[in-house]
Image: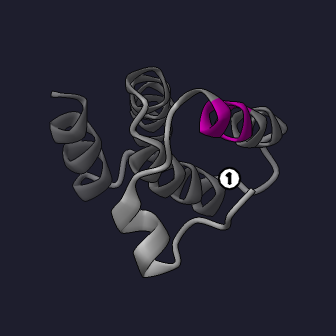
């Protein structure tokens, strides 16, 4: 559902709402252990606002999550994720 709202706000060029939904989507992906999707979402957040200081905190969340959740094999094979 969050993915739908993110796409809608992006299409409507509602950057502030898009950013807000993307931050929630990032948190959902991290909690679910979907590190690849969380990383993809973080990239979009950085594109929207590269100066948002919370992006550094989000990056740290991703790093910590890699230790809790196994990195998906398809990410390693494609070279998207570096080995620890």
Q: Residue at x 15, y 27 (%)?
A: 1
Quarter of the figure with residue 9: top left
- Across the whole image, how many numbered discs are drawn on residues? 1
Spot occupied by residue 61 in the image (x, y as percentages of width and height)? 69, 31
Q: Residue at x 51, y 57 (%)?
A: 44
Q: Is residue 64 left or right of residue 18?
A: right
Q: Nearer the viewer, residue 26 or 67?
A: 67
**Main secondary structure found in the magenta portion:** helix
Spot occupied by residue 72 in the image (x, y as percentages of width and height)? 40, 52
Spot occupied by residue 53 in the image (x, y as percentages of width and height)? 84, 38
Q: Is residue 34 magenta?
A: no
Quarter of the figure with residue 17: top left
- Range covered by the magenta-colored residues: 61-67
Q: Nearer the viewer, residue 13 or 83?
A: 83
Mark 1 falls on what kind of element? loop
Q: Residue at x 24, y 30 (%)?
A: 2
State the residue position of label 1. 49
Q: Is residue 34 above or below residue 75?
A: above
């Amino acid at each position: 559902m969050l993915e739908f709202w993110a796409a809608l706000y992006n299409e409507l060029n509602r950057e502030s709402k898009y950013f807000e939904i993307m931050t929630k989507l990032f948190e959902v992906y991290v909690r679910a252990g979907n590190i690849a999707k969380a990383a993809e979402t973080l990239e979009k957040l950085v594109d929207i606002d590269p100066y948002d200081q919370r992006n550094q905190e989000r990056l740290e969340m991703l790093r910590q999550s890699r230790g809790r959740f196994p990195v998906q094999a398809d990410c390693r094979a494609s070279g998207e994720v570096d080995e620890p």
